[in-house]
Image (cartoon, rainbow, N blue to C red):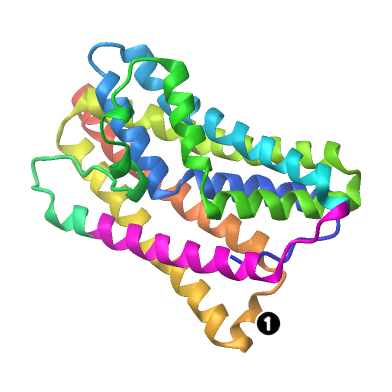
Amino acid sequence: MDVALPHEWYALCLLVLVLGMRHGFDADHLATIDGLTRFNASARPRLARFCGVLFSLGHGLVVVIVALAVSMVAARWQAPGWLQVSGMMVSVLVLVALGLLNLRAVLATAPDEMVRPVGVKSRMLGGLARTHRPAAIMAIGGLFAISFDTISQATLFALAAEQFGGWRASLSLGLLFLLGMFITDGINGLWISHLIRRADRSARIASRTMGLVVSLLSLAVAGLGIAKWTWPAVDDWSEGKELVFGLVLVGLVGLSFLYSMWLARRPLAVSAR
């Protein structure tokens, strides 16, 4: 989507960190980490807990490499105007598809089963997502970063960093984006591993809650993108508020995540009395 980057360095760093955290909540990320965690849960439970960390590390390294590469040629290259428009269109289409697929998953899952997040890219992987090797999990995360949406974001960050010191600033922003994904995807992997070990009624409720929240937020973000593209007044109103929107989105997902964990732990607290 069209992102109006701030000129102040610290505000830019905070924005990139928040966008990395929001990117970590992408339904494709959640679906793939879910599959990798489930596949390793019985044979390699310790690895299962860190599937999210490994996935985000591989994904973030590609973002860092792209940001550095763009910064090296930024002095001789200007990003075309169609890049941001095309990136927004791709983002909206993917978000709508993921929102509808995950809403369908919530509604179609039987009450005695846990809801599994659905992703477009994760379906394309097939057997590649069934691996016990940490390096292969990182490679899968790297493959997910080779997309128009992710590369256009990394390009935009690198170009914005040029006014703050060239490749060093681009490297810093790439690492902050990686850190944001590292936090959200890492926590998600731990949470999924926890739910798999429990597999009780509260765990099923928790998975349903998170599935519904991810679906509705995906559709809401897509709706905002369409509104900005269609009505100039909405675009003018939202200009400069990207950091606020990012914080609100991460906050909502984080609160729903904590609520889901509370639901998953509630029976233990009851039984302890």
Q: Position of residue 233 (x, y in %)?
A: 62, 88
Q: Which residues are magenta?
A: 76-103
Give the farthest residue toward the front.
76
- In magenta stretch: residue 79: yes
Task: Check disc 1 and report the residue beneath it.
Answer: 236
SS class of the residue under badge 1? helix
Question: Is 61 in front, or is 181?
Answer: 61
Q: Is residue 194 visible?
A: no
Q: Position of residue 245 (x, y in %)?
A: 59, 63
Taking the spot 72% from the left edge, 48% from the top edge, the residue there is 14
The residue type indicated by label 1 comes to: Asp
Q: Position of residue 59 (x, y in %)?
A: 54, 35
Taking the spot 41% from the left edge, 61% from the top edge, the residue there is 95
Question: Is 225 in front, or is 254?
Answer: 225
Q: Is residue 45 above or below residue 78?
A: above
Asked where in the image residue 242 lies, by quadrant, the reply is bottom right
Q: Is residue 6 above or below residue 45?
A: below
Question: Is 130 in front, or is 197?
Answer: 130
Q: Is residue 212 visible?
A: yes
